[in-house]
Image (cartoon, rainbow, N blue to C red):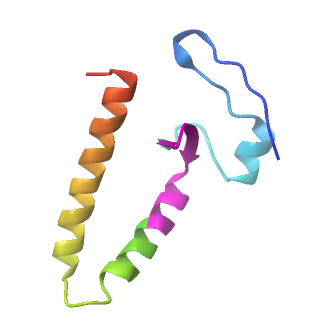
């Protein structure tokens, strides 16, 4: 389902309440904003955790350790943050 929202001063966007309720989002929750192929995706903490678990299950099926996975994931997170900083020029 599509929802419409207006971009406010400072780039603020209000997520419609029906969608916040459906996704169990509450005031103060942290979300990840991801750009994929020109689209913006808003990822909840629950979704991010599910993605991380799926990645871990794929990655840990071989001889690598949890420490290897965590090191790799940290590198991925830093790269993603750098990309977002370049896109939004926050640094």
Q: Residue at x 77, y 37 (%)?
A: 17
Residue drawn at 25 percent across, 22 percent down: 91
In the shown orientation, is residue 70 left or right of residue 26? left
x and y percentages locating residue 35 in the rendered image? 49, 40
Q: Quadrant of residue 66?
A: bottom left
Q: What is the x, y in percent for residue 41?
A: 57, 44
The answer to which of 82 and 36 lies nearer the viewer is: 36
Residue nearest the viewer, comparing 45 with 86 = 86
Q: Quadrant of residue 39?
A: top right
Q: Would you say 79 lies left or right of 24 here?
A: left
The structure residue drawn at horizontal position 26% and vertical position 46%, both measured from the top left corner, is: 79
**Looking at the picture, how far across and down is residue 43, in whole percent?**
54, 49
Q: Is residue 37 magenta?
A: yes
The magenta segment:
35-51
| Placement of 90 over or under 78, stated as above or below | above
Q: Residue at x 57, y 43 (%)?
A: 42
Residue at the farthest top position = 9
- Residue 70: percent from left, percent from top: 23, 67
Residue 13 falls inside the magenta stretch: no
**Left or right of 75 in this view: 87:** right
């Amino acid at each position: 389902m599509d929802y419409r929202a207006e971009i406010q001063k400072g780039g603020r966007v209000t997520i419609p309440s029906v969608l916040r309720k459906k996704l169990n989002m509450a005031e103060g929750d942290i979300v990840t904003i991801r750009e994929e192929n020109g689209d913006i995706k808003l990822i909840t903490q629950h979704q991010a955790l599910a993605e991380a678990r799926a990645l871990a299950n794929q990655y840990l099926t071989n001889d690598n350790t949890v420490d290897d996975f965590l090191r790799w994931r940290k590198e991925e997170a830093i790269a993603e943050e750098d990309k977002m900083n370049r896109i939004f020029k926050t640094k």
